[in-house]
Image: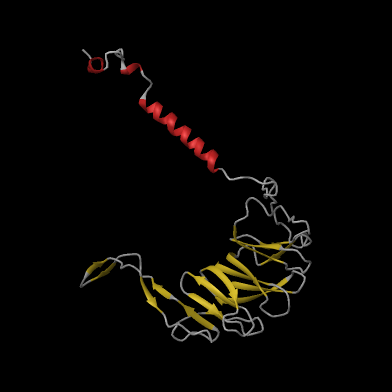
């Protein structure tokens, strides 16, 4: 006799194989719990919530934009978009006053000057951009950091057009950029995150910054302060010596540099 019938004689024997799969039952219960939880925790919506159903586009689909910032570069009271690119023409996309920007391929900077302002060259490899009034003339100048090659400042003429001036290392490996008055002299300085060495470039008060080599942080050039440590990057390849045989490359060891005070 089935043990279940022995202890519960009023219950007929049941073939357990005929019942729904235990796994299906558990899955159904879990789905119900999830749906109930979503219903209870779904965020409330309001009539004044922002909508992003119709995004405003700018530039072209094939643009390799590596950095972007906003600011009123042409002094017309609205915010423009400034985009730097890797191996393509960087540009400031001018706001038409209604929040619309040039949406297309840059093929003639002069002919498209009513909707954008080109800066740099198509073969520049910029990685970051910021805006600051580096020459204290009341308008925003552009600062473009190079991932390879020369970084540049684009001095604004007050109408959104600019002339370039070099700053930083001639062989930059920059990754990040910020501007601010670090030494309290009223002029914005530039802080650069570089793969080789993080550096502060001090403004001379007229919008000029050091441009050239950095041989040592122990005796840095005037207007330059090293920040943090510089990693020693040994060869990635094994080396051979007659006495010791093959030597595997050692891991990179950070070397702390002399830090120059912000004065």
Residue appearing at x 76%, y 68% in the figure: 74
Q: How is the image coloured?
A: secondary structure
Q: Is residue 108 visible?
A: yes
Residue 170 point in image, percent of width and height:
54, 75
Q: Do we see residue 149 in this rendering?
A: no
Q: Name the residue at 67% across, 84% down.
A: 206
Tell me where residue 114 sits by quadrant.
bottom right
Looking at the image, residue 193 sits to the left or right of residue 243; the answer is right
Picture mark count:
0
> In the rendered view, would you say 5 is above or below 148?
above
Q: Is residue 39 above or below residue 67?
A: above
Residue 1 left/right relative to 234? left
For the point 35% across and 65% down, which residue is it? 236
Q: Nearer the viewer, residue 48 or 75?
A: 48
Q: Measuring 48% from the left and 79% from the top, which residue is drawn there?
A: 226
Residue 121 in picture, x, y percent from top left: 65, 65
The residue nearer to you, when weighing 194 against 138, is 138
* Observer-nearest of 45 and 99: 45
Relative image position of residue 68 (x, y in whole percent): 62, 62
- Which of the image's four quarters has the C terminus? bottom right
Residue 231 position in % (x across, y down)? 40, 72
Which quadrant does the N terminus fall into?
A: top left
Left or right: 86, with 96 as reference point: left
Viewer-nearest residue: 211 or 244:
211
Drawn side of residue 57 relative to residue 126, left or right: right
């Amino acid at each position: 006799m089935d043990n279940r019938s022995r202890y519960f004689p009023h219950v007929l024997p049941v073939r357990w194989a005929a019942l729904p799969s235990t796994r299906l039952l558990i899955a159904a219960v879990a789905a119900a719990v999830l749906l109930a939880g979503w219903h209870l925790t779904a965020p409330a919506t309001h009539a004044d919530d922002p909508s992003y159903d119709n995004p405003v586009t700018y530039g072209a689909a094939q643009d390799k934009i590596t950095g972007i910032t906003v600011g009123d570069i042409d002094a017309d009271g609205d915010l423009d978009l400034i985009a730097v690119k890797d191996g393509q023409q960087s540009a400031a996309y001018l706001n038409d006053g209604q929040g619309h920007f040039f949406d297309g391929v840059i093929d003639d900077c002069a002919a498209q000057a009513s909707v954008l302002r080109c800066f740099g060259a198509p073969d520049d490899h910029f990685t970051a951009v910021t805006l600051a009034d580096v020459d204290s003339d009341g308008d925003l100048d552009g600062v473009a950091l190079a991932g390879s090659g020369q970084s540049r400042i684009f001095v604004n003429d007050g109408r959104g057009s600019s002339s370039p001036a070099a700053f930083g290392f001639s062989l930059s490996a920059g990754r990040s950029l910020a501007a601010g008055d670090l030494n309290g002299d009223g002029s914005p300085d530039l802080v650069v995150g570089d793969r080789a060495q993080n550096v502060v470039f001090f403004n001379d008060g007229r919008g000029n910054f050091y441009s050239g080599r950095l041989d040592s942080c122990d005796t840095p050039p005037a207007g330059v302060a090293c920040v943090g440590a510089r990693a020693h990057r040994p060869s990635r390849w094994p080396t051979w010596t007659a006495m010791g045989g093959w030597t595997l490359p050692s891991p990179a060891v950070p070397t702390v540099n002399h830090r120059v005070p912000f004065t």
